[in-house]
Amino acid sequence: MLIRTLSLCDLPGVMEVQRSAYPDGLIEPAASFARKLEIWPEGARGAFDGDVLAGYLFCHPWPTGTVAPFGSKRIVIPTAKADLFIHDLAVRPERRGVGIASLLVREAVAMAAAHRLSRCALVAVLDARPFWERLSFRPVCEIGYGAGERGWYMVMDLPASPPLVRNGSTDPWTAAPYADDVRSQNLPYSD
Ligand SMILES: CC(C)(COP(=O)(O)OP(=O)(O)OC[C@H]1O[C@@H](n2cnc3c(N)ncnc32)[C@H](O)[C@@H]1OP(=O)(O)O)[C@@H](O)C(=O)NCCC(=O)NCCS
């Protein structure tokens, strides 16, 4: 099993895995994956068996306490306080149960720590909430997500680390005040 960053050439495989893993209401267009790749290339990871994409994870910084819009082709990386938002994680049904998703999540958490982000966030859909709880994510509230689907907004706090200082200024992702209540912030929308 090889884990590597994805490129635009991998998007057909991503769409295939997505189709195998989600109902219609949770299918995001290829252009929304392309946008995630464009704004945060390191957050697009694939697990490969030979040439076959067995599973993928997409993540990127997103304003703390808010939910990244489903299926958007226009998201931008925040300049202020951010979580690492795990936007999507899926494994082909026939490749499940051997730890592929856990490996991909471990990479995302390491990425968050490397960027001094203080927490990871996501929306757990289908029956995935217990999977995330096993990985130390806690449910915050239930929300509408995708086209007529529901999910649990979940977060995991990372151990505190010193702020990253670049050229004398503090990393913008550690500088702003912490907001912890998703209900007082943006709720998901599509565009
Ligand atoms: C959820 C999903 C990504 C898990 O992928 P996976 O590669 O099978 O996960 P892992 O093999 O790393 O599983 C790790 C552990 O979690 C358990 N687990 C996996 N899915 C679970 C679930 N839905 N509920 C509870 N436990 C689950 C596994 O049994 C395993 O336990 P073990 O360590 O005791 O063996 C996969 O089932 C999937 O693609 N589902 C459809 C899409 C989806 O729901 N994605 C998540 C969106 S938030």
Image (spheres, rainbow, N blue to C red):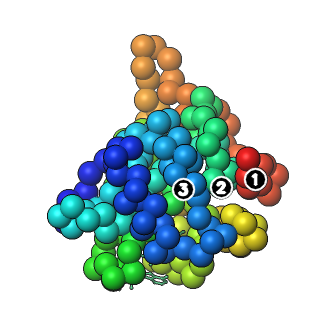
Q: Mark 3 vs mark 1: which is more N-terminal?
A: 3
Q: Mark 2 vs mark 3: which is more N-terminal?
A: 2
Q: Spatial distance from mark 2 to mark 3, Cα to Cα?
A: 8 Å
Point out residue 114 in the picture as x, y percentages from the top left corner.
37, 41
| Circle on res. 189 | 1
Point out residue 63 in the picture as x, y percentages from the top left corner.
64, 42
Disc 3 vs disc 1: Cβ atoms closer than 8 Å?
Answer: no
Determine the secondary structure under disc 1: loop
On the rendered structure, is 187 left or right of 99? right
- The residue drawn where x is 42% and y is 20% is 166
Q: Amino acid at mark 3?
A: His
**Residue behind mark 3:** 87
Q: Amino acid at mark 1?
A: Tyr
**Residue behind mark 2:** 70
Determine the secondary structure under disc 3: strand
On the rendered structure, is 58 left or right of 67? left
